[in-house]
Image (cartoon, rainbow, N blue to C red):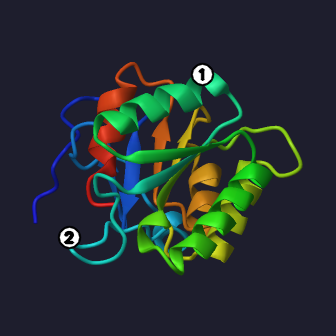
């Protein structure tokens, strides 16, 4: 298979990891020149095949976790345009409570299950974003977690996110956040 190259030029900043390849989250092209090296075994964040595993279909519940009310509101507005139902949490402890309530409610009403979490990493409080990610995945290993943060995608950050089983990394400083977020909901 011939390698495709990121066509938009944003691939070095905005990308997700699919197996051992870096894929631009803006244009979908392979990010040329990004060596996976240390990520090969630590980060195997592959896209699920269509029809397999959880998907964030319209009408599904999405948990938005961010300490900044402005970003929670912005993400909620974007998601509600595509008919998703959102639940907000301002810190990690609140997110854990919301997910636990959703898991209990899903036992009798499957539509109450949280289908996706959108998580900021840089949050003050008793538990930060990394700890929150670890707890959420311990509670529901099948929960896809999309990281939406202003932290730069360093090799160390991506390795840690891969070990914690994050689904995707997106930079919330993007000028086209709406398009970036909606594009990356597909197939999750």
Q: How many marks?
A: 2
Q: Is residue 131 left or right of residue 107?
A: right
Q: Is residue 130 left or right of residue 86?
A: right
Q: Which mark is residue 50?
A: 2
Nearest the eye: 105 or 67: 105
Badge 2 local density, few (<14 within 10 Å), some, or many (20+)? few
| SS under mark 2 | loop
User: Could you tell me residue 89's position as x and y percent?
Assistant: 67, 44
Badge 1 local density, few (<14 within 10 Å), some, or many (20+)? few
Pointer 1 residue: 70
- The residue drawn where x is 38% and y is 57% is 60
User: Could you tell me residue 124's position as x and y percent?
Assistant: 83, 38
Q: Quadrant of residue 44?
A: bottom left
Q: Is residue 74 left or right of residue 66?
A: left
Query: Which tag, 1 or 2, sits closer to the chain's start?
Result: 2
Residue that lies at the very extreme toward the top in this rendered image = 175
| SS under mark 1 | helix
Report, in whole angstroms, how far the alpha carbon at label 1 lies from the one at label 2: 33 Å
* Image quadrant in which the N terminus is located: bottom left
Q: Which mark is residue 181?
A: none
Say whether residue 153 is visible. Answer: yes
Q: Is residue 19 left or right of residue 124?
A: left
User: Could you tell me residue 166's position as x and y percent?
Assistant: 53, 61
């Amino acid at each position: 298979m011939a390698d495709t190259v990121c066509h938009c030029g944003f691939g070095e900043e905005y990308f997700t990891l699919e197996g051992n390849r870096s894929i631009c989250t803006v244009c979908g092209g392979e990010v040329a020149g990004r060596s996976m090296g240390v990520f090969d075994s630590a980060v195997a964040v592959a896209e699920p095949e269509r029809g397999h595993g959880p998907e964030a279909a319209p009408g599904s519940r999405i948990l938005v976790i961010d300490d900044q009310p402005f970003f929670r509101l912005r993400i909620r507005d974007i998601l509600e345009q595509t008919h998703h139902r959102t639940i907000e949490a301002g810190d990690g402890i609140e997110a854990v409570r919301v997910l636990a309530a959703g898991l209990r409610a899903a036992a009798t009403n499957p539509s109450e299950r949280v289908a996706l979490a959108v998580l900021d990493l840089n949050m003050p409080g008793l538990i930060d974003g990394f700890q929150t990610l670890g707890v959420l995945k311990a509670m529901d290993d099948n929960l896809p977690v999309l990281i939406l943060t202003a932290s730069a995608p360093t090799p160390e950050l991506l390795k840690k996110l891969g070990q914690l089983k994050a689904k995707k990394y997106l930079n919330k400083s993007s000028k086209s956040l709406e398009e970036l977020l909606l594009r990356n909901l597909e197939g999750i």
